[in-house]
Amino acid sequence: MYQDPQRWGITLQTYVQLTMLDRHLSGVASSAPVMMMERSIFSSKYIFVENLFRSGKMPEVDYAVLSEWFDWITTNVSLPVDLIVYLQTSPQTCHERLKQRCREEEKVIPLEYLESIHQLHEDWLIKQNSSPLPAPVLVIPADHDLQKMLHQYEENREKILEASYL
């Protein structure tokens, strides 16, 4: 997808939307008190699909189809979200972490892509001036090393766990 987004963008995002819908619905059906997801059907649409479209890498017709599906799903299917935890990280830190992970499929991701994704997250979750939020947002600064991050996670543990009982 990163090497040829115009060809693979619609394919990947259709699959992601289906997968995220399945994850949301399996969480609703689960008896577990808390379900955490790295990404959601909302971030898929408001961040990744939006980025492909705005950057000119997704044709308008593909964007319209994905948007129609998303609108139908969110109108007709109950997808409760109690809290969004935003691990706010600079694009530069993300880029360094990608390099350290050394995953083959991530080697082609440029810093500019991460900057675009970051800006869309900021517009949606912080400025709240783009798309509707399905839940309150807890922002956790995440440019820190692992030890500090573990401490921050522990500091916010109750806020995260209590959100599922609101």
Image (cartoon, rainbow, N blue to C red):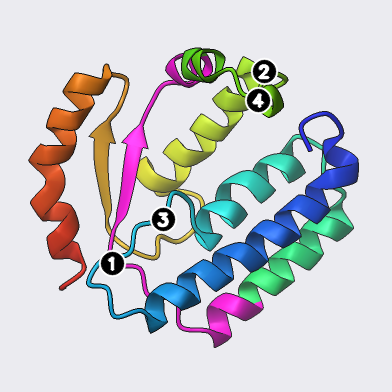
Residue type at mark 2: give it. Answer: Pro
Displayed quadrant of residue 13: bottom right
Mark 3, other Cα within 10 Å: few <14 / some 14–19 / many ≥20: few
Asked if marks 3 and 2 touch (Cβ < 8 Å), the reply is no
Magenta span includes 83: yes
Asked if marks 4 and 2 touch (Cβ < 8 Å), the reply is no
- Local secondary structure at mark 2: loop
Q: Disc 2 marks which residue? A: 110
- Please give left or right for residue 74 compared with residue 124 in the image: right
Residue 2 bears which disc, if any?
none
Q: Disc 3 marks which residue? A: 37
Looking at marks 3 and 2 on the same chain, the residue that comes earlier in the sequence is marked by 3
Residue 106 bears which disc, if any?
4
| In-front residue for pair 163/75 | 163
Question: Alpha carbon of mark 2 to alpha carbon of mark 1: how far?
Answer: 33 Å
Is 159 rendered above or below residue 28?
Answer: above
- Local secondary structure at mark 4: helix
- Local secondary structure at mark 3: loop
- Local secondary structure at mark 1: loop
Q: Look at 34% across and 42% down and name the residue there.
A: 86
- Please give the range of residues in magenta: 72-95
Q: Disc 1 marks which residue? A: 82
Q: Nearer the viewer, mark 1 or mark 4?
A: 4
